[in-house]
Image (cartoon, rainbow, N blue to C red):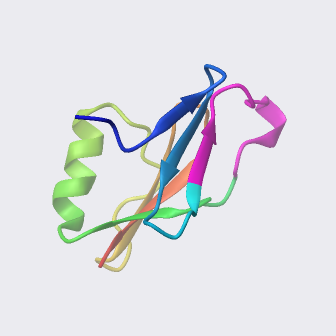
């Protein structure tokens, strides 16, 4: 089975959204300490906010907030960028 993404030049990962031709591009060679996101760059949806929170906590992910208003929390990725998880 072929993966749903393509690696280009050893550091660009292109993940297609759907058949529209739009893709999410992740680049592993652009990290700069002074350019990390201080506010969430995007969020991940979950139907169980507590399970998502405890899973990331068990994985030793740096959690920036507790669960807020029963709907969302922030965490940092490996580069220090802030991300968000939201209950959908």
The reply, left or right, for residue 32 in relation to residue 44 is: right
Residues 57 and 87: in front is 87
Q: Residue at x 55, y 43 (%)?
A: 14
Q: Is residue 81 visible?
A: no
Residues 54 and 47: in front is 47
- 15 is higher (above) or lower (below) than 8: below
Q: Residue at x 27, y 54 (%)?
A: 53
- Would residue 28 be counted in the magenta stretch? yes
Give how far across and how far down residue 29 sits, in percent. Answer: 71, 25
Give how far across and how far down residue 34 sits, in percent. Answer: 83, 36
Quarter of the N terminus within the rendering: top left
- Res 47 quadrant in image: bottom left
Q: Which residues are magenta?
A: 24-37
- Res 2 quadrant in image: top left
- 55 is higher (above) or lower (below) than 52: above
Q: Is residue 71 visible?
A: yes
Q: Residue at x 73, y 30 (%)?
A: 31
- Res 18 quadrant in image: bottom left
How many tags in the picture?
0
Quarter of the C terminus within the rendering: bottom left
- 70 is higher (above) or lower (below) than 23: below
The reply, left or right, for residue 42 in relation to residue 27 is: left
Give how far across and how far down residue 25 sits, in percent. Answer: 61, 47
In the displayed orientation, state which residue is furthest to the top: 10
The reply, left or right, for residue 21 in relation to residue 65 is: right
The reply, left or right, for residue 60 in relation to residue 29 is: left
- Would residue 11 be counted in the magenta stretch? no
Q: Residue at x 50, y 36 (%)?
A: 6
């Amino acid at each position: 089975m072929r993966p749903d993404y393509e690696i280009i030049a050893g550091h660009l990962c292109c993940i297609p959204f759907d058949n529209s031709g739009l893709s999410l591009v992740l680049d592993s060679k652009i990290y700069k300490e002074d350019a990390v996101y201080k506010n969430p760059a995007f969020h991940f949806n979950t139907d169980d906010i507590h399970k998502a929170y405890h899973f990331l906590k068990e994985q030793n992910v740096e959690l920036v907030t507790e669960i807020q208003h029963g709907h969302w929390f922030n965490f940092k990725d490996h580069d220090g960028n802030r991300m968000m998880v939201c209950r959908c």
